[in-house]
Amino acid sequence: MLRIVVAKPGLDGHDRGAKVVARALRDAGHEVIYTGLHQTPEQIVETAIQEDADLIGLSVLSGAHMTQFRRLVELLAERDSSDIVVFGGGIVPDEDLPALNEMGVAKIFTPGATTTEITDWVTEQFPED
């Protein structure tokens, strides 16, 4: 069973999508820790390390995705936890996807992605023994 932290960084107050994804991942057999709204990257990384997470899923709708993902990846590196895979979803323009991938974000699900696409990606990318 994978341990996945689902988080809402920054000031964005809309968490319905994050909760739906968290539930879908849980229903797919993963252990999910949902951090709630208004988390800082520092809080998210601390939670992921404390919970021995395999993945962090960020939901960013505020337009601050470049800053939020960059800081999260930097903090994971500083804490020797770059083995925790970062993925996300939200309002992210297509032109930002290559830069996010280059900084170490494994996958971004844009609006319209289904929960099945997300759970299938997790299952395919991280098969469990």
Image (cartoon, rainbow, N blue to C red):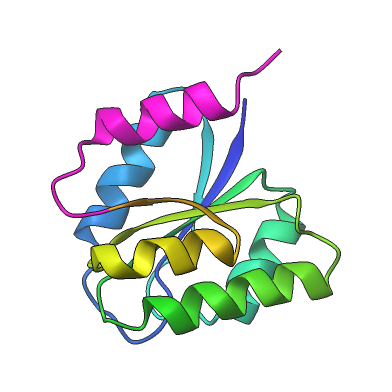
Looking at the picture, does residue 85 appear above or below residue 125? below
Give the farthest residue toward the left.
Answer: 112
User: Does residue 90 appear left or right of residue 74 in this picture?
Assistant: left
Where is residue 44 drawn, in percent x and y?
59, 69
Instruction: State the residue at coordinates (75%, 59%).
Output: 49
Where is residue 105 drawn, in percent x and y?
53, 58
Give the farthest residue toward the top.
Answer: 129
Does the magenta-highlighted stretch encompass residue 78? no
Asked where in the image residue 11 lies, by quadrant, the reply is: bottom left
Is residue 35 visible in the rendered image? The answer is no
User: Does residue 49 appear left or right of residue 67 in this picture?
Assistant: right
Looking at the picture, does residue 109 appear above or below residue 104? above
Q: Quadrant of the N terminus?
A: top right
Instruction: State the residue at coordinates (38%, 30%).
Output: 119
Does the magenta-highlighted stretch encompass residue 122? yes
Q: Quadrant of the C terminus?
A: top right
Instruction: State the residue at coordinates (69%, 51%).
Output: 84
Looking at the picture, does residue 124 appear above or below residue 81? above
Is 119 or 109 nearer to us in this picture?
109
Where is residue 19 drawn, in percent x and y?
30, 52
Instruction: State the residue at coordinates (43%, 62%).
Output: 98
| Range covered by the magenta-colored residues | 110-129
